[in-house]
Amino acid sequence: MTLVPQISQEHALGAAEYVLGLGDAASRRAFEAELDTSAALRDEVLGWEYDLADLAALCPARAPRTSGVRRLETRLFGAPVREFDKGQSARRVIAGMVLAAGVGLYLLGQIADDTPSSERSQPAQAIVK
């Protein structure tokens, strides 16, 4: 028979609040300090996480409405965050890759020019020619 350590009702409620994210930063830090020292409290938190994960599986994920996101961005940042279209992002990625390849080839040429021909490997000589 294994004895399971019991925790107080206050600690059980604290574990539920912690998992739900209801506390402020100071109370979260204090609770996390208790978690470091109490295996029973860690078990309680794991139990709540497991139980709430089952509930979350019952609710389909839904993206927030665009108007709500824009209001939140305006409140947080003073203005809505500018969106980039996918084509514009792809062009930037391609331009970055071309730039990186050009810089790499330039540096390779500089290294090849600085190396005496007697020390160059066969592939490096082929690139320089």
Image (cartoon, helix red, strand yellow):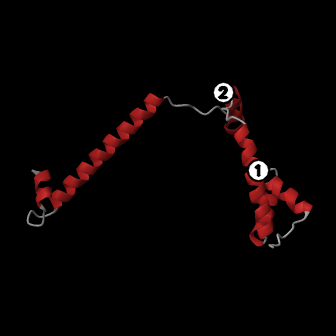
The one of 46 and 97 positioned closer to us in this rendering: 46
Front: mark 1 or 2: 1
How far from the left and from the top, in percent, is residue 2? Answer: 80, 72
- Density class for disc 1 (Cα within 10 Å; few <14, some 14-19, many ≥20) is few
User: From what the image shows, is residue 126 above or below residue 78?
Assistant: below
How far from the left and from the top, in percent, is residue 24? Answer: 81, 54
- Contact between marks 1 and 2 (CB within 8 A): the answer is no
How far from the left and from the top, in percent, is residue 45? Answer: 77, 59
Label at residue 51? 1
The kind of residue on which mark 2 rests is Thr
User: From what the image shows, is residue 55 above or below residue 17?
Assistant: above
The one of 80 and 63 positioned closer to us in this rendering: 63
Left or right: where 112 falls relative to 91: left
Residue at the spot 22% in from the left edge and 54% down from the top edge? 108
Report the residue marked by disc 2.
Answer: 66
Residue at the spot 85% in from the left edge and 58% down from the top edge? 14
Residue at the extreme right of the image, as rendered: 9
Label at residue 128? none
Q: Secondary structure at mark 1?
A: helix
Q: Secondary structure at mark 2?
A: helix
User: From what the image shows, is residue 61 above or below residue 109?
Assistant: above
